[in-house]
């Protein structure tokens, strides 16, 4: 949310019209990333935190490792839309 807010502040301070194509097209990619965080990544982190308490002095168990792999894959997937949004804001195509 801070990224979007910061983008609006910078656009207004640079006198860019908020209806400009690159600004409009850079906003939708934030939504799939936010959904992935809300539906997948945040719950996985909660589960990992609970599991981490049980092996503080011992070895990491297989359930935690599985959640870590899931988090890594979905974390990478959730990053792609943000990279697209950043490219649109910086390159300003069309």
Image (spheres, grey):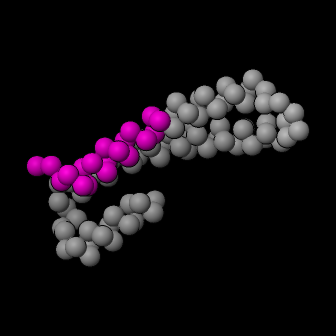
On screen, residue 37 versus residue 67, left or right, reads left
Q: Nearer the viewer, residue 87 or 59?
A: 59
Q: Which residues are magenta?
A: 76-94
- Can the viewer see residue 56 in this picture? yes
Residue at 18 percent across and 53 percent down: it is 92
Residue 9 lies, in percent from the top left, at: 33, 71
Residue at 48 percent across and 42 percent down: it is 35
- Within the magenta stretch, is there residue 64? no
Residue at 20 percent across and 52 percent down: it is 91
- Within the magenta stretch, is there residue 77? yes
Residue 81 lies, in percent from the top left, at: 37, 41
On screen, residue 33 versus residue 12, left or right, reads right
On screen, residue 78 versus residue 10, left or right, reads right
On screen, residue 58 versus residue 10, left or right, reads right
Q: Picture quarter containing residue 8?
A: bottom left
Vertical comparison of 83 with 14: above or below: above
Vertical comparison of 30 with 63: above or below: below
What type of secondary structure mainly makes up the magenta span? helix
Vertical comparison of 65 with 83: above or below: above
């Amino acid at each position: 949310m801070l990224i979007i807010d910061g983008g609006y502040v910078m656009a207004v301070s640079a006198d860019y019209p908020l209806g400009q194509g690159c600004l409009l097209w850079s906003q939708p990619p934030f939504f799939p990333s936010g959904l992935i965080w809300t539906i997948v990544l945040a719950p996985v982190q909660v589960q990992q935190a609970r599991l981490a308490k049980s092996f503080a002095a011992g070895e990491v168990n297989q359930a935690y490792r599985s959640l870590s792999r899931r988090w890594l894959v979905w974390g990478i997937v959730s990053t792609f839309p943000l990279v697209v949004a950043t490219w649109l804001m910086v390159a300003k195509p069309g």
